[in-house]
Amino acid sequence: MKMELDDEFRAIIGEFINETEELLEKVDKGLLELEKSTEDKELLNSIFRTFHTIKGNSMALGFEKLEKVAHKTEDIFKKIREGELKATPKMTDVVLEAVDSIKLLVEDLKNGIESSLDITGTIERLGLAATGKLEDIPAKGQVDVVPAIETAKETPDKEETTGPKKKPSPPATKPSQVKISEGTIRVDIRKLNSLLNITGELVLKKNNLLNVSTQEGLKNSEKDGTEKLNEITAKFGLLVSDLHEKVISTRMQPIGRIFTRYSRIVRDLSSMLKKEIELSISGEHTELDNTIIEEIGDPLMHMVRNCCDHGLETPEERKAQGKSSRGKINLSAYYESSFVVIEIKDDGRGIDPERIKKKALETGTVTQKDIEKMEKRELFNLLFLPGFSTAEKVTAVSGRGVGLDVVRESILKMNGIVELDSELGKGSVFKVKFPLTLSIITGLEVEIGTQRYLLPQESITNIIRVSPKDLLKKRVETGDEKKIEHTVSFKPDRTLPIINLKDTLKEEEEEEEGRENFIVVIKEGETRVGILVNNVLKQQEVVVKPLGKYVQKISPPEVRGASVMGNGKVELILNDNHFLALSR
């Protein structure tokens, strides 16, 4: 049922939701740390205060279900603080169930509906835990950790019975329904102060410009009008660049916001799969554009689950191989050039290239002739094809043939790159790269046929002037079609694959005999590819404008977005990540 609220109370509830979500993120991490450090009084007090705060705020706003769950959980930690109870894994399971219930209640509240979640079972289990009767608590399955990225395309093999359940409720996204919380981010006050200072400087320069534009101002100036105007314009340019940098920084958020949830997921999977798994996290203070952070959670979750299920062996298998019984997964983030890199690494069994070859031949994905020429990295890229899976059996965690293809598709939509590398017997590593920001890029303006396009500068390594005789043409038959593939020869034993965008984008132009062209070489890791263009013009900063939903459906994958240039014309921005993926 939709909640009827006035604007003032809606704003108050919005603040409550934001604060509660932040507290829940911290408490998830704190509960898992408490399992390892049961005598940590400061951590125990922090968790107690969190539930006390949620209880008090819920009571003040009249959210009865939230208050009951938080109050019962608070009672448990009060007794742990007083030494009447101990923080055990079974106790943590019960509390984590309560946290899940609170999250579901907050989610319904955020969507502006009265929750129909039945909390009776949760309250009962919390009550038994508070009296120390953990053995009387009925066994429950693990929390459902299957992410939305996969469940949207799958039908479960059987009805799930894990985690707290809620009865079907009205859709939360009806056009007439307004969400209470549309999503907010916290910005460091120092960033806002910096923005205020730059804005003040811009106001001063605006006044200087207005002064120069008057006859009286020119008369009183020691410099002539042109020189003074050039000076003010130059300073304006510096201030605008600085403003652009600071505004982008307000959108940047620590990636630790999503990293914290994976500790809980790994703990649940460890129990479900009967494996000993240790997750280490580093680089959680690395900042990434908030738009990416909102979307990257599910793809990362799938890769973490893959490491737990496919990557790591059982304790018995690890011991037989001379490894520690506890498998390790490392989740890290760091900066590399103008990219943020997220790495998920495990020390498990690794991926057998021969097994991929066998599966690829069985499914007819590639021919025997082609597979003999493929390098190890190219074989691993087959795992990102739709429906391709080397899992021997279907499990509750993975193996339905839906997953890595959806992961790659999601990452490419955010202009990211995903790579997989592995060594048999030693482990695997997923590497995901994203540009620091999606809004403003430095682009190289190029001419293809009669049109101008922009190529993102960050992936360009060099530009080569070539004559027609340098291009090696090869006719390739693909089904009923014939096409021309180009390569360029640098040395007798070295060639570079070329993508001819004039053909791809169907740009028409009369061929000029002997006309020189340019190849813009883009590189990422070991992958290189050349983009054949007619002319290279200039480099400039541009604002990326996303294509509309209708245009996105019909636009080729070679196009990333568009930008309005200084002359008022619209130019398309090419998707360098798509070209790199083609090369792979």
Image (tube, rainbow, N blue to C red):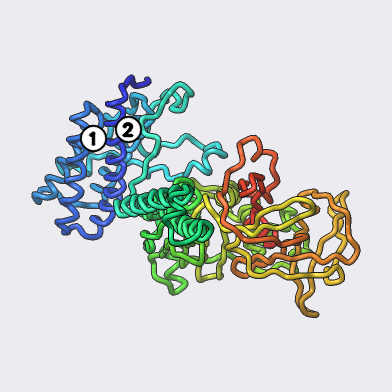
Up/down of 125 relative to 580, above or below: above
Quadrant of the rendered image containing residue 1: top left
Q: Which residue is mark 2?
A: 105
On the rendered structure, is 175 left or right of 49? right
Report the front residue among 394 and 4. Answer: 4
Labelled pair 1, 2 in contact (Cβ < 8 Å): yes
The C terminus is located in which quarter? Answer: bottom right
Q: Residue at x 18, y 50 (%)?
A: 46
Determine the residue located farthest toward the right in the rendered image.
513
Foreground mark, 1 or 2, reads: 2
Q: Residue at image x 23%, y 55%?
A: 34
Does the rendering let one see residue 273? no
- Chain-order first, disc 1 or disc 2: 1
Identified at 69% across, 53% down, the residue is 453
Residue 570 percent location from the top left of the image = 66, 45
Residue 69's label in the rendered image is 1
Q: CA distance from mark 1 to mark 2?
A: 10 Å
Q: Determine the secondary structure under disc 1.
A: helix
Q: Residues within 10 Å of mark 1 (few under 14, many from 20)?
A: many
Q: Is residue 60 left or right of residue 558?
A: left
Using the rendered image of the protein, determine whether residue 495 is visible from the camera's viewpoint: yes
The image shows residue 139 at horizontal and vertical percentages of: 31, 41
Q: Amino acid at mark 1?
A: Val
**Residue at (22% x, 26% y) in the render:** 62
For numbered disc 2, what is the local secondary structure? Answer: helix
> Residue 23: x, y in percent?
27, 45
Residue 511 percent location from the top left of the image: 88, 57
Kindly indicate the quadrant of the structure image that contains residue 287: bottom left
Would you say 476 lies left or right of 146 here? Answer: right
How many dots with numbers?
Answer: 2
Amino acid identity at mark 2: Leu
Q: Residues within 10 Å of mark 2 (few under 14, many from 20)?
A: many
